[in-house]
Every structure is written in structure tokens, then in C-alpha cells.
Image (cartoon, rainbow, N blue to C red):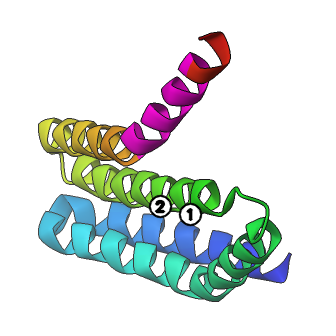
Amino acid sequence: MTLLLRLCGVAMIAAAVSLILKKSHPGQAVLVVAAGLLLLLAPLLSPYAAITKELVHLLSGTGFDAYGALMLKALGIGVTVKLAGDLCRSMGEETLAGGLELAGKLEILLLCLPLMRELLALLREVMG
């Protein structure tokens, strides 16, 4: 809980400084937002690694190992694209953000194609 409160504080301070700088130095305001984002994400890397390790351990030997890895990759793509898109939006680049989000969705679709192929093969086997 204390980590979450600290992260809220970092976000509020970065937003306030960015708001103050936006009128006189818009380029620096974007850098403040990017730095705030890095400060928010850095403390979450260790817990994310622990969660990933635990999920891999839980799924190992169940036959669902590949699905767990696929889920984590898709989650990573989604989070990365969301953060980068939001950063583009804060710089006023809505079109770039939209294009980036579309690319992320297509990447997740490509990632899931082998799983879809497996599921359709299983469905054909059950029905046929």
C-alpha cells in the first residue's frame, strides 16, 4: 500500500510540474511526463518478475505452459503500447498513438495465431 501511495505522489508531482511547464516550455513538460512514467514503472519491475516467475511455476507441467507464456507476452505488448500511446497523446500526437495501438493489436493477433490454429484443429478433431 505504501508503494502505491508513493507512486500516486510521483504521478501527481509529475503532472503538476508538467502543467506548470506546458505553457512556457512544452518540450520540457513532455520530458517531465516521460521521467515521471519511468519513475512509476521502475519500482514495479521486481514485483512483475516475481509474478511472472510464479505463473510460470504454477503452469509448469500442466500442459498450459505455452498458454501462460503467450498470455504474459500479450500482456507485455499491451502495457508497452498503452504507455507509449499515452505518451504520444500527451505530446499531441493522436494519429501516432492510434497507429501504435493498431500495431500492438496486430502484434497480439499474430502472437495468438498458433493458438488459434491449435484450437481449430482440436475442434475439427472433436467434430470429425
Position above or below: 2 against 21: below
- Highlighted range, magenta: 112-124
Residue sitting farthest toward the front: 128
Return the x and y of residue 109 as percentages of the image width and height. 36, 38
Residue sitting farthest toward the right: 1
Q: Which residue is mark 1?
A: 69
Secondary structure under badge 1?
helix
Q: Which residue is mark 2?
A: 73
Q: Residue 9, located in which quarter of the rendered image?
A: bottom right
- Are discs 1 and 2 less than 8 Å apart at CB? yes
Q: Quadrant of the C terminus?
A: top right
Q: Sort mark 1 into few (<14), some (14-19) or many (20+) by Cα contacts within 10 Å.
A: some
Q: Quadrant of the N terminus?
A: bottom right
Q: Would you say residue 115 sits in the magenta stretch?
A: yes
124 relative position to 95: left or right: right
Main secondary-structure element of the magenta-colored stretch:
helix
Residue at 40% x, 51% y is 82
